[in-house]
Image (cartoon, rainbow, N blue to C red):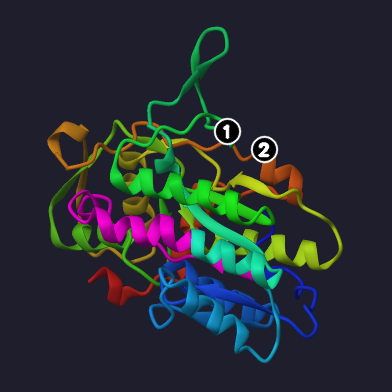
Amino acid sequence: MENPKDSPKGVSAGNSQIWLIGNKGMLGTELSLLFESRGLAHTGTDREVDVTDIAALEAFAANQAAPITWIVNCAAYTAVDKAEDDTGLCRRLNTDGPANIAQTAKKIGAKLIHISTDYVFNGKGVTAGNPPALRPYREDDPTDPIGVYGLTKRDGEIRILENSPASYIVRTAWLYGKHGNNFVHTMLRLMNEKDSVSVVDDQRGSPTWAYDLSGVIADLICTAHAGRHIPYGIYHFSNEGSITWFDFAREIYEQGRNLGLISKSCVVKPCTSAEFPAKVTRPEYSVLDKSKIKAALGITPPDWKTSLSEFLKICDPLKTS
């Protein structure tokens, strides 16, 4: 995929704007900066406009000076383990909130982009081919979430498509970025503190840099503004590659040491998921098939290692200490 920082400015939306919901999170912050750099008029909200209150959503939309033609929803309850004990709030934010946003989008005639997750699948993967082997999850593969978080996100997808046909759902996985807590920051901190770290080697997926995902969302909007219709529905996006968390951690260490982000030797050891018990079983397989979004937007997602390298060059050292 073309690096968003090198992309041309997006097509002007004219007397209209994008409404970015969840603008203070990791992805939302990245999107705010990218929309600004591409000249895309936008407004952002976070907790000050309650997504579980449809009247509040409709009132905000009605009070804008410029009409809203796109809504991008990055708001979500993402604490996977805590969700098991906080089912009510998780469902309100991940299912009821998206339904309200979709109804609002339909009422004001706006297109909706909603961010979802690999957790809508059971993480066992799909076997195909001869000889049989796991293949990346496609958008039309059956969902089968195994925890409250995944279940509420899956139900949120259903409610969106029921309430607003003019919607795009973008599923992603293993997200990391500059503006929030994530695996990369955690590993850099631990590798500066400890002589060794153990990382699971039996969960496979594809890391996703929030910067790259933001670029795809902006590309979708700009492409539509340019007059090309992208079919509504579900899409998958991540960086390219199929690795384990151990593979990811090992590369973080190698690049981090080379860039001076890690100041001491640290041994990265593989371990099993059983050695880190949790309330929710983490997906064993989260690789997503991106053929659909590649064809729709004409993009080539960057390899995970390349994006990690770009991220570490701008990584905030304060978040690693």
In the rendered image of this protein, does residue 150 appear above or below residue 53? above
Q: Which element carries disc 2, helix, strand or loop?
A: helix
The answer to whether residue 207 is seen in the rendering is no
- The kind of residue tagged 1 is Arg
The amino acid at mark 2 is: Ser
Q: Which quadrant of the figure has residue 271?
A: top left
Numbered disc in front, either 2 or 1: 1
Nearer the observer, 55 or 145: 55
Say if the magenta span includes residue 87: yes
The verdict on residue 319 being magenta is no
Residue position for label 1: 138
Residue at position x 61%, y 84% from top? Answer: 62
Q: Residue at the spot x=40%, y=57% of the render?
A: 94
Circle 1 residues within 10 Å: few <14, some 14–19, many ≥20: some
Furthest residue toward top: 131
Comparing 193 with 4, the one in front is 4
**Foreground pick, 296 / 204:** 296
- Place of residue 52 in the rendered image (x, y in percent of width and height, measured from the top left): 40, 68
Rendered location of residue 318, percent (x, y): 29, 77
Which label's residue is closer to the chain start, 2 or 1? 1
Question: Can residue 153 be seen from the camera position used here?
Answer: yes
Residue at screen point 58% across, 33% down: 138
Quarter occupied by residue 97: bottom left
The correct choice, above or below, for 158 with respect to 62 in the image is above
Q: Which mark is residue 291?
A: 2
Determine whether, in the image, residue 60 is placed left or right of residue 194. right
Tell me where the magenta segment starts and ends, as one range: 70-98
